[in-house]
Amino acid sequence: MSLEKLPSCDDPFDSLMPVEEARTRLSQALNVVADTERLALIQAHGRVLSDDVVSPVNVPGFANSAMDGYAISSSSIPESGEVTLTLAGTSWAGKIFEGRVEAGTAVRIFTGGLMPEGADTVVIQEHVAVSDNQVTIDSEVEPLRNVRLAGEDVKANQRVLQSGTVLNAAELGVLASLGINEVNVYRKIRVAYFTTGDELLALDEHAGEPLEPGMLFDSNRYSLRSMLSRLDVDVIDLGIVRDNAAQTRAAMQQAAESADVIISSGGVSAGDADFVTQVFHELGEVGFWKIAMRPGRPLAFGQIGDAFFFGLPGNPVAVMVTFLQFVQPAIKQIMGTRTTDPFVIKATCMSTLRKSLGRVEYQRGVLGNDEKGNLTVTSTGKQGAGRISSMSAANCLIVIAADVAGVSPGDSVEVQPFHGLFA
Ligand code: AMP
Ligand code: MG
């Protein structure tokens, strides 16, 4: 990766970089993990296909009945009145009827049963009168009904899945239906993360203890871990790094040796305690971006060795927002995923939202419906970047463009639902 083309915003008087530009530059700087592996389908949940999949077969492989009923030839349907057909046998799902359906005969058939030769129509059982081994149908029966044709779901030689597709329930079902038991996927990537700050206490070591003045529990660690667990990556937790150069350097070096992606929280401003900034300058190919967004203005991005590094801000809401807007799409791209953009919908805003011009704001909102069923969104209230409870009160981010000065009730706004994003 060449970072020469990436703008550096070390100068505090540099103008802010628009969000879209940061997204584009980031995407251009990344590359997909090169290694692939072959996995049994049962192991492949959540993984990303590294090859297109072409169907070796038709699905369904044979014409079969979509209903329980009677398989007939449409030539048996009378022009008017009724006709009585002789039952010649039964076609069960998994137990075929060997004979042929001639005009004047019918075969009892169940859903999934192979259509016997000569039959092209299934009359559902509610539309026939049955006595002994005879069924009576009338002229109302429609020809060519209730039959699933061979290949109507997937045709042989059709490309069913594109490389870059994430294998979830539907894709695994499709592959299994094609009889494909092994797939080529990108290898899992390793993501190392650490939090920084002299004020942080590790919850797992200090739970139940009273907090000394000035101290707080490391919450970013938990949010980051949880958001990462939504992605199919291996995580390496490097714990809390104190505000000094030696520890920060050791953590970054250790991370660079073991991981494809490194994430830190805190210490990326230009203050005296911002050792991530200092050490990253020393070790990495650096881009410091001051992004025109709120929360989460400073974002350090670049490479340390072969690993991509993301230095997120420290404020808990800013950590989540910058992760979701930049790091999550970046990790998806590195994993080989084809579509990485956050899902955006429109909703009518029910609240007055204040904001300043010049930055995209990601405010916390609650999606709902009005009495007509239209999508609405309501603010969670105060929007400070340190109020992590506002994220938990919300179920979406309201994305307000840089050139918008504020939102009034009734305005249409763009919303990123949490569902699918990290919830
Ligand atoms: P920083 O970017 O390091 O100056 O941190 C900004 C704010 O976020 C400060 O109020 C920190 O105390 C807070 N903060 C930083 N890291 C964490 C963390 N891991 N968990 C909770 N709060 C944090
Ligand atoms: Mg700090």
Image (cartoon, grey):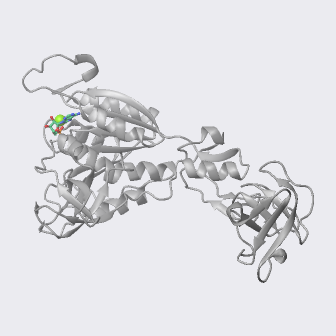
Toward the left, the furthest residue is 213
Front residue (pair 63, 28): 63
Q: Residue 353 lies in what quarter of the image? A: bottom left
Camera sees residue 186? yes
Drawn side of residue 66 relative to residue 134, left or right? left
**Residue 166 position in % (x across, y down):** 53, 51
Front residue (pair 292, 162): 162
Front residue (pair 118, 421): 118
Residue found 27% across the figure and 27% down from its top: 240
Toward the bottom, the furthest residue is 79
Front residue (pair 170, 43): 170
Residue found 29% across the figure and 41% down from its top: 280
Look at the picture and state if 264 lies above or below 65.
above
Residue found 15% across the figure and 42% down from its top: 387
Report how many numbered discs are placed on residues in the image. 0
Camera sees residue 5? no
Look at the picture and state if 13 lies above or below 313.
below
Look at the picture and state if 271 lies above or below 147.
above
Q: Quadrant of the C terminus?
A: top left
Q: Residue 399 lies in what quarter of the image? A: bottom left
Image quarter where ligand 2 lies:
top left
Residue found 23% across the figure and 29% down from its top: 218
**Residue 182 position in % (x across, y down):** 69, 44
**Residue 188 position in % (x across, y down):** 53, 40
